[in-house]
Amino acid sequence: MKAIGRAAIWFILSIWIIMAAGCAGSDTAQREEGPVCWASAQLQGGSGKAFVETPCPVYKKEGTLCALITWSSDHYDYMIVNEKKILQVNTEGNAQFMVPLGSLEEIAGEAAGAESGGAEMLPDALGGTSLEIDVQADTTAMSTPHLIDYTLSFVFYKTQEEAEGAGTEKADDGDSAQEEETAVDEEVMEEAAAVEEAGEAEKASQTLSGEKAPDIDGLTFLSKDENVYAECFAIYRYEGGYAVLSVDDGRRYLIVPEGGAIPEGTDGQGGGAVLKDEDGQELIVLQQPLDRIYLAASAAMCQFDEIGAVRNVILSGLERDDWYIESAREAMDQGTLSYGGKYSEPDYERIVEAGVNLAIESTMILHAPKVQEKLELLGIPVFIDRSSYESEPLGRAEWVRVYGLLTGCEEEAAKAFDEQKGYAEALAPIPEGDTRSLAVFSINAARQVVTRSREGYLGKMVEIAGGTLCTPVLDSSLATETVSIESFYAAAEDADILIYNASIEDAPEDLAELCAKDSILTQFRAVSEGNVWCMRSSLYQNANRTGAILRDLHAIVTGEAGDETEFFYRLK
């Protein structure tokens, strides 16, 4: 019986292997014939960190159009499309999947399908047609596999060149939700990515904490600065005003004081200037004054504002009206600060003409590695801000010391950080049993709730302020999640306080307008008790004011806030 059982199993496995090989061979043969058309592709959902390559080729297989999707990493092992599981079509490199989109008639309509006349007319029938499909992808990048919801959006074109041009136009118009959200609130996306990579970030910070001071020929090491909360950077001091700024992504920067000699052994100039320490590790050389900065990491502008160093920034990654920081708006009005293009499409000509001596990018630049490469080829060093990866909210505020070091405003930076630390240290403890519950949310046009997890930036701030976050988000790897309003109600109907997140969706004028979004909101306890607050949209551009935000949240939790604080106001 055992022999028969084993034989049956081997027979089934053999059939499965033959079928799998046949499918793989079919995909390969189809791709060898070439795509029938191309599509610009955009990805929405997840943490915002993942993306797919665009444009992508579209093939026709047994009457079904299939897009060859290439992910931004090799950590995806399968996808679910139309409730069917599909596997990778490659074994090396970033994960690729042949995603079925439907027949020509289903995509372009019955009339277009009838008029197409055959495969040779396929591009004409599809030209300019758009399609949006919901998919799931299983990622193995975290400690355990996670099946994540995404939406793939396609617009079809005859040729690769047309798709590339149209994709650029679409991004410029802000049709890509990912790009639009980045322009308005880059830090929200960075936070989500930081939470998703919490394990990796923790390992990196541990490596940084055990790092020894770089041994640089010709420089005498003095001391290492002690951080209070921040874990993602370290500052080493050397004689003569030299310093090394080490970041937990492995990049290190040698800060050379104004008038100071660049150490011998430095290779290259400008953005290509690197120096190797005694252990052979590279340091990117930054020569002060760093006073002609292209700031694509918009969330860092608040730190420059805090220390009076907005004057050091001459090109911005945001347009004038996207800034909530008044000094940035004023600088653009006065002409001392200009728009230099967003992080993914900088105005290289203007950057070179302006004599930019440092580009400060967020981790979003990792989505556009060719941009970073080109900036450095143009002789412009690139510094990548990782403040959103700090596990402690006040660690973000401590990054003001980084920008104080770069701009020569260290006294101002120390004073600014001490002020925020003081706000946090002054919070009165909440008596046991008096803890109040909060829920943070916004409602999108599809009547879905975007809410927060306990592991995210706001979740941790609520905890520090003495509150408890009510949330339906159970996955600790997520900072935000979009859920049904019914799921949100089940988790937060009895919350003492509701806070509407106006950084993502426009704020309602009053409680009546909020409840008009869905009648179920009238059944929330906080609504009936008039304890609904709205977050000012500027909150995410104020990481420098983390201590003040904690102060405001604590006042709301304790009932001492009145009807308005610096960052929140009550909806009536």
Image (cartoon, helix red, strand yellow):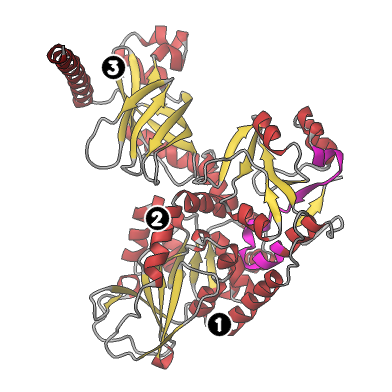
Q: Earlier in the sequence, mark 3 or mark 2?
A: 3
Q: CA distance from mark 2 to mark 1?
A: 30 Å
Q: CA distance from mark 1 to mark 3?
A: 62 Å
Task: Determine the residue positioned at 46% across, 23% down.
Answer: 129
Any part of residue 346 in sight = no
Task: Please identify the quadrant where the C terminus is shown.
Answer: top right
Residue on which the image places disc 1? 410
Q: Is the residue 339 above or below the residue 129 in the image?
A: below
Task: Please identify the quadrant where the N terminus is shown.
Answer: top left
Q: CA distance from mark 3 to mark 2?
A: 40 Å
Of 543 and 116, which appears nearest the observer? 543
Residue on which the image places disc 3? 61
Q: Which residues are magenta?
A: 525-550
State the residue lying farthest toward the front. Answer: 1
Residue on which the image places disc 2? 200
Image position, residue 407 (x, y; %): 52, 78
Identify the image quadrant of residue 237. bottom left
